[in-house]
Image (cartoon, grey):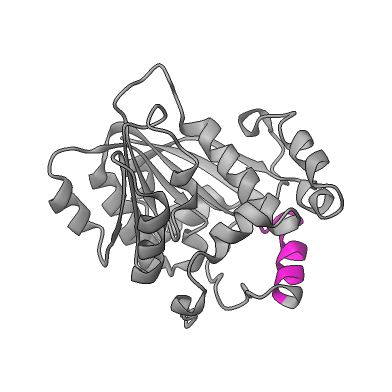
Amino acid sequence: MENNFNYSEIPNGHYDDIYHHDHGMRGFWHWSKFETVKKMVIDHQLHSRRILDIGCFSGTFLGTLSERDFAYQLGVDILESQIHYARKKYCTNFREFAKFDHLDNICTSQGEALFDVVTVIEVIEHLRAEEITALLKSIHRLLRPGGDLIITTPNYFSLWPLLEYYLNRFSDISYKEQHITKFTYLNFEKKLSTIMQGDLKSLYALEMMTTSHLITPFIAKIHYPLAKKLATIIKARHWKIGIGPLLVVKLQRR
């Protein structure tokens, strides 16, 4: 299936604005996923670590991290206008953003300074199989041995299809044309291995797979503070039931 959606039509800073100002279902979704990923990647016992956020869009996720969290932070995206927004709002002496057309260009610009963590937050569902394969192989070259790759993507074995239907019908952005490769908690590893034609296990070890959000996005529409409180009760890494709307996977580079 080909993705014909024109991502340049999304206004600059669109999701950043939702994150900061929408105290409902959409704002909570972004807040909760970033908090979930942060808990997986931040380790204050390790210093001078480097993180790469692929598909950073307007830079919101890296904007939630401090220099203490990661000494060097790089966000990349294919949309120059969104990168311009990210640079203007979130650039610091330890954080930068760059437009890229191919991840191998990052290998050239960064030299031997590999990354400790790479995040791919709600990106792979927008890609075709061959694009996912190329992405994960490029990330393998960018990660240090033992480094972590964090992937999040909607879990279609959950309430997510209901959320997606609601957003497609009532929000200003539709995901109907955007989401072309769909995963579930039950099929993720097998489907990704099939997509990569058996190369997945030679490149990465599956360290953890979980889900998050559960019913909290629906609660956020009614009572945002309560949804945030509920979301912090059980950490995603301790949630063993794969029915949350957001799939969160941690792969370790071999």
Q: Position of residue 237 (x, y in %)?
A: 61, 30
**Circle count:** 0
Q: Position of residue 147 (x, y in %)?
A: 33, 33
Q: Magenta part of the protein: which range? A: 156-168
Q: Position of residue 88 (x, y in %)?
A: 38, 57
At horizontal 48% and vertical 69% (from top left) the residue drawn is 12
Quarter of the image for the C terminus: give it. Answer: top left
| Residue 197 in sight here | no
Is residue 75 left or right of 14 when viewed as pictured? left
Quadrant in which residue 175 is drawn: bottom right
Is residue 209 left or right of 70 when viewed as pictured? right
Is 132 above or below relative to 243? below
Quadrant in which residue 252 is drawn: top left
Q: Which residue appears farthest toward the front when viewing the image?
A: 88
| Residue 235 in sight here | yes
Is residue 253 left or right of 230 when viewed as pictured? left
Query: Viewer-proximal residue, 58 or 170?
Result: 58
Quadrant in which residue 144 is drawn: top left
Query: Viewer-proximal residue, 128 or 213?
Result: 213
Tell whether position 224 is magenta: no
Q: Which residue appears farthest toward the right when viewing the image?
A: 222
Q: Main secondary structure of the magenta part?
A: helix
Tell whether position 165 is magenta: yes
Is 136 above or below relative to 50? below
At horizontal 25% and vertical 64% (from top left) the residue drawn is 102
Query: Viewer-proximal residue, 46 or 88?
Result: 88
At horizontal 41% and vertical 62% (from top left) the residue drawn is 85
Q: Which residue appears farthest toward the top when viewing the image?
A: 45
Query: Viewer-proximal residue, 51 or 241?
Result: 51
Q: Position of residue 82 (x, y in %)?
A: 41, 66
Is 227 above or below relative to 173? above
